[in-house]
Amino acid sequence: MKILVINAGSSSLKYQLLNMEDEAVMATGIVERIGETVGNLTHKAYPDTDAEKKVAKEEEIKDHKIAMHMVLDLITGSEAGVIKDPKEIDAIGHRVVQGGEAFTSACVVDNSVKVAIADNNPLAPLHNPANLMGIEVAEELFPGTPNVAVFDTEFHSSMPPKAFLYALPYDYYKELRIRRYGFHGTSHKYVCNKVAELMGKKVDEINVITVHLGNGCSMAAIEKGKCMDTSMGMTPLAGVMMGTRSGDIDPAIVSYIAESKNIGIDEMDNILNKQSGLKGICGLNDMRDIHSAVANGDEMAKLALDMFAYRVKKYIGSYTAVLGSIDAIVFTAGIGENDDVTRAAICQNFSGLGIEMDFDKNNGRKGEPTPVHTDASKVQVWVIPTNEELQIAQESMALLN
Ligand code: AMP
């Protein structure tokens, strides 16, 4: 079975074609700046086990339909093609960010599913309309091929009301659907299943805290394979500190800044989403730049790093309490997989909770699943590269089978 995974953003389109017989990536790429005067496409294809072909294009890409046409031409073309006919694609799996309460599992797309996805647009105005557009373009270009929607929120739908409700007037939950939904669900699910497999356990035998640290950061408390709590909230702004997002703050700060600085809602939104987090403290949002700055004696970069690690540590502590006991912690995503310094800062002085990192094993970037705990540690600590595309493809395949 060959599955094309699509992640459509408002001006971008990421794709990956997988052969599910051996879960190998046949082609992968990204189209960016769709709708701008100059767009770009980067495509990598693996026609044979050892061969990699790269294609880069820079030209106007007017809309997502044209972008998808370009991808299809590349996948089937002579330059860097991996299949002959689009009909060889058995299914298309779509990342959809917000499933709301309507979707607790992946589903094959039909009209009622599209209506329900659109109904969630107000909850994810930057993502859901683009995801839906990706589905509609795929329906047009691959007639007869099933489309599957896999939701970022779906894995978190097992949270109990005490975890997902905000302590606001209850009517707002009913009327406006204000609640914690959580995000990065496919990533949390993938690494949780993977760590169980690597520990030789069934996922319903272990409690795990998954720590997804990338541009966006989120954590999940997972009891026997079911998410009990997660750090992102109604939107991906909540939780731990991120590259440019504030994470949790006292909500009264918002009106205080708005009044003091005479700032409107849009600007406030921009401050919290784009000017805060690591960037707000030290002016830099990429951890690699922050480490270079720390090495050059930048005190604010050091403070940003300390704050970041402290907040993740606090969540690990609170999720240990939520779960009662934990069997494993998994680090994943750009920072989680590559940044040994940040992982070490998070795991310092944790032996009281049975968490003992082996700092030698932790050293370096981890391109594959790696245990980084001491033999004496009660809790296993792992670094596991995430694979959201594979998770989406696996769910699509399971559904269609
Ligand atoms: P992601 O959103 O998962 O792609 O993660 C992107 C983020 O990972 C970047 O903004 C960096 O902060 C971080 N990152 C990537 N590579 C490294 C590295 N080698 N060392 C430290 N941080 C890294």
Image (spheres, rainbow, N blue to C red):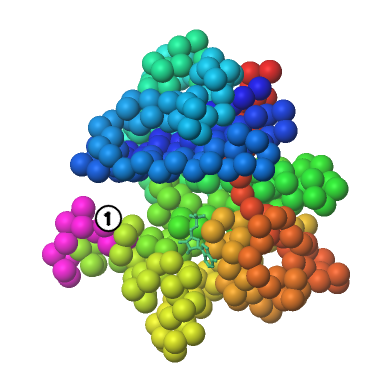
- Is residue 95 visible in the rendered image? The answer is no
Using the image, determine if residue 118 lies above or below residue 233: above
21 or 228, which lies in front? 21
Q: Secondary structure at mark 1?
A: helix
Amino acid bearing label 1:
Asp
The residue located at (51%, 34%) in the rendering is 80
**SS assignment for the magenta stretch, majority:** helix
Return the residue found at the far front.
78
Position of residue 97 measured from the top left corner of the image (x, y, whole percent): 45, 38
Which of the two residues, 326 or 344, is positioned nearer the viewer here? 344
Q: Is residue 85 above or below residue 103?
A: above
Please give left or right for residue 16 compared with residue 400 in the image: left
Task: Specify few, some or many for label 1: CA neighbours under 10 Å numbering under 14, 14-19, or 20 or more.
Answer: some
Image quarter (top left, top right, bottom left or bottom right) of the C terminus: top right
Which image quadrant for residue 387? top right
Can residue 87 be seen by looking at this rendering? Answer: yes
- In which quarter of the view is residue 219 placed? bottom right
Q: Residue at x 66, y 57 (%)?
A: 367
Residue 162 at x, y = what percent? Answer: 56, 47
Picture layout, residue 233 above or below residue 271: above
Q: Which residue is mark 1?
A: 269
Residue 166 lies left or right of residue 212; in this view the side is left
- Residue span colored magenta: 259-272
Q: Report if residue 192 lies within the magenta region.
A: no
Q: Nearer the viewer, residue 120 or 359?
A: 359
Q: What residue is rendered at 45% in x and 12% in y?
A: 143
Quadrant position of residue 314: bottom right
